[in-house]
Image: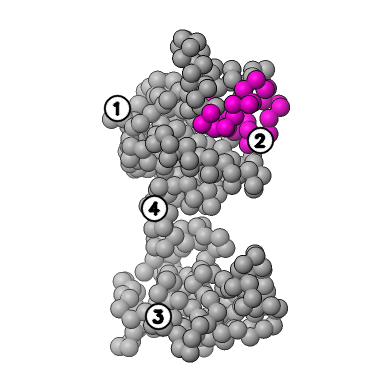
Amino acid sequence: MAPVRIVGLHKRYGGFHAVRGIDLDIADGEFTVLVGPSGCGKSTLLRTIAGLEDISEGEIWIGGEVVNDMRPRDRDVAMVFQDYALYPHMSVEKNIGFGLKARKLPKAEIDTRVAAAAKMLGIVPLLQRLPRQLSGGQRQRVAIGRAIVRDPQIFLFDEPLSNLDAQLRDEMRGEIKRLHQEIGTTMIYVTHDQIEAMTLADRIVLMRDGVIEQQGSPLDLFERPATRFVAGFLGSPKMGFLPGRLARGGEGDRVVLADGATSLPLPVGRILYGAADGSPVLLGLRPEHMTRAQGEAPPPGVARLDATIELIQPTGSRSYATFRLGGEPVMAELQAHDVSRPGEHVAIDINLNRAAVFDAASERAL
């Protein structure tokens, strides 16, 4: 196991600046997920850590040692790729043990390590099969097994589940999470899937246009997004954003929505720094912030209104119901039996204690 430290890292491809001044510290044994949209630089950053890409500027430290000039095989990292990268003519057993054989380890030790990895991943019955005889999920387990037997300081995963169907992705997420809990090795995982990021990570590093937009625990980023981009990227269904203006007064601040008729009071004591009366803002509401009204009166920090449901999306025990708020469509998370058809009128409670408010120009949280 080893910590990773990245200082002032830049990567340029000619005139294209793919990674722009990344500073990042990853603790020993931490599961860090690099997430963001396609082209944000996350895979490039991972490949520089592996040594598969040279850096243009900065330093990479692994286990207290600068590795800028080290060859990939000397960095003591193991990488699991999106396309499995298995040798098609070799059995599962030989694929897993290939790297150990190349390092000239004794056969008895190779056999012991391969058997232990296969048992951990539940692929012992597959050891004599060829890759073409395996499912996608089984191939990915083999690729992970090949990394495990090396006993590296760091595991690197480059979108390893993107080729799998939804059910297999769910299963493999659980396998990778369990693997980290068992072996405790530092893991750095790249994905564009925010569900993978939220379920796997000790810490999420959300990237955008080659820089870190925000980093922290999954719950920190979900509940306290620093920007509209972060708020909109994490969460499914996504947060809705309502344009309006800030009305500051002695009895508390309010957000007056774009229709001019809908005014939502912000919780008493909530201070919005750097925003003047009349400032254009965006009010961010997640579906779970809006539920069917309960009780005779809403609790403090909760606004109640009557909504006309336009669209219902059942998901089993819950339904997502779309209605208009300030003229804009928003989605509420309701119990399955709270609403049965479009056109119904439902009393909705909006929990403004959990709402986010962003400056409309900078899109940063207030």
Was residue 143 drawn as part of the magenta stretch in this picture?
yes
Query: Looking at the rendering, which quadrant does residue 347 occupy?
Result: bottom right
52 over 209 or under it: above or below: above
Few, some or many residues within 10 Å of mark 1 (<14, 14–19, 20+)? few
The residue tagged 3 is 301
Callout 4 touching callout 1 (CB < 8 Å): no
The residue at 52%/82% (across/down) is 293
The residue tagged 4 is 217
- Mark closest to the chain's N terminus, 3 or 1: 1
Percent x, y of residue 122: 57, 32
316 over 163 or under it: above or below: below
- Mark closest to the chain's N terminus, 4 or 3: 4
The C terminus lies in quadrant:
bottom left
Q: CA distance from mark 3 to mark 1?
A: 51 Å
Callout 3 touching callout 2 (CB < 8 Å): no
Please tell me whether mark 1 or mark 2 is closer to you in this view.
2
Q: Is residue 282 visible?
A: no
Percent x, y of residue 101: 51, 13
Which element carries disc 4, helix, strand or loop? loop
Q: Say which amino acid is labelled 4.
A: Ser
Few, some or many residues within 10 Å of mark 3 (<14, 14–19, 20+)? some
Q: CA distance from mark 1 to mark 2?
A: 37 Å
- Mark closest to the chain's N terminus, 1 or 2: 1
Q: CA distance from mark 4 to mark 1?
A: 26 Å
Q: Say which amino acid is labelled 2.
A: Gly
- Mark closest to the chain's N terminus, 3 or 2: 2
The residue at 47%/37% (across/down) is 179
Magenta span of residues: 119-146
Give residue 65's mark.
1
Was residue 250 drawn as part of the magenta stretch in this picture?
no
The residue tagged 2 is 136
Few, some or many residues within 10 Å of mark 4 (<14, 14–19, 20+)? some
